[in-house]
Image (tube, rainbow, N blue to C red):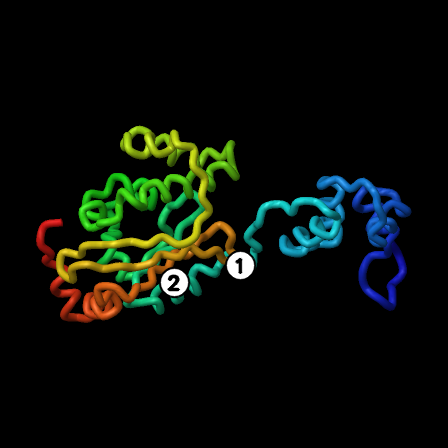
């Protein structure tokens, strides 16, 4: 409004006007008084103050409200290059990255060699878990882990009940896998975490790994899944051999399964 100022920024009264609230009410909000605050008003204040998504969520917390869902900041859209470096550095151990619908965004060479991830798959980790014959033939712990996978997928779906993306994955699974339907009807819920996997690789033999699903705060739409070798069956040494030139040549011509 007018003349140049010594200090840049908006005055309290100007923030109130631009946010569509009274100046006194906005002052009470700043002072943390016990007043009724709606998400719509907080969003207006966040917009006027040009808050980032993290700052907007913090504003909700200060006001005693449940924060909104994480959003990807414009400056963090290009993090995929760094995440690619992360999973490549995780070699010789398998690693992959999923979007909210369990679609595989990227995977490292070890995930291809050990888990059988490959371009001709559906590239959806839940669908492939139930339909990929190669992975199923290798997974000694498939039946044990299936209930956990479905419970985790149901938990993700329950957070976005009207999301068409989840509905599409669910419809596909329902059409191709009676086993998925049976487990889904149990209505179990489980957060993503760690899963023990036993794999019978056609070249290296038994592999025992622990998969850990981790969120990246700056990219809440992505989940990084790292597989760590356990001490059993000399798994770490076997994975290192599979990633070596000799092991890769052997993996190109595996026996059945």
The N terminus lies in quadrant: bottom right
Q: Is residue 97 left or right of residue 122?
A: right
**For residue 254, what is the image quadrant?**
bottom left
Query: Which residue is rendered at x = 42% and y = 62% of the image?
Result: 83
State the image coordinates of residue 12 (x, y, percent, origin top left): 86, 54
Question: Quick one: SS at disc 2?
Answer: helix
Q: Residue furthest front?
A: 232
Residue bearing the label numbered 2 = 84
Residue bearing the label numbered 1 = 76
Q: Examine the rendered structure and indicate whether residue 86 appears above or below residue 211.
A: below
Query: Which residue is rendered at x = 82% and y = 52% of the image?
Result: 32
Q: Say if mark 2 contacts mark 1, CB within 8 Å.
A: no
Badge 1 density bin: few <14, some 14–19, many ≥20, Cα 10 Å = few
Frontmost residue, 154 versus 189? 189
Q: Is residue 244 left or right of residue 164?
A: left
Disc 2 from disc 1: Cα separation: 14 Å
State the image coordinates of residue 249 (x, y, percent, origin top left): 13, 65
Lower position in the chain sequence, tag 2 or tag 1: 1
Q: How many marks?
A: 2
Q: Is residue 232 left or right of residue 44?
A: left
């Amino acid at each position: 409004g007018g003349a140049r100022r010594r200090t840049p920024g908006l005055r309290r009264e100007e923030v109130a006007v631009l946010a569509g609230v009274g100046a006194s009410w906005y002052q009470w909000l700043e002072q943390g008084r016990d007043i009724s605050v709606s998400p719509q008003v907080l969003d207006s204040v966040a917009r006027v103050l040009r808050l980032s998504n993290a700052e907007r969520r913090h504003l909700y917390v200060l006001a005693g409200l449940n924060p909104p869902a994480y959003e990807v900041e414009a400056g963090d859209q290009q993090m995929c290059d760094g995440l690619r470096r992360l999973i490549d550095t995780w070699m010789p151990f398998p690693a992959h990255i999923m979007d909210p619908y369990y679609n595989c965004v990227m995977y490292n060479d070890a995930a291809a060699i050990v888990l059988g991830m490959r371009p001709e798959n559906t590239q959806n980790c839940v669908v492939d878990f139930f339909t990929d014959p190669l992975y199923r033939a290798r997974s000694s712990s498939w039946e044990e882990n299936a209930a956990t996978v479905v419970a985790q997928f149901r938990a993700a779906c329950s957070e976005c009940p009207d999301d068409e993306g989840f509905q599409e994955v669910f419809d596909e699974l329902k059409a191709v896998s009676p086993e998925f339907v049976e487990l889904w009807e149990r209505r179990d819920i489980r957060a993503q975490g760690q899963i023990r996997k036993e794999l019978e690789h056609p070249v290296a033999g038994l592999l025992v790994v622990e998969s850990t699903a981790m969120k990246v705060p700056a990219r809440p739409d992505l989940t990084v899944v790292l597989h760590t070798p356990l001490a059993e069956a000399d798994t770490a040494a076997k994975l290192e051999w599979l990633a070596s030139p000799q092991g890769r040549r052997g993996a190109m011509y595996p026996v059945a399964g």
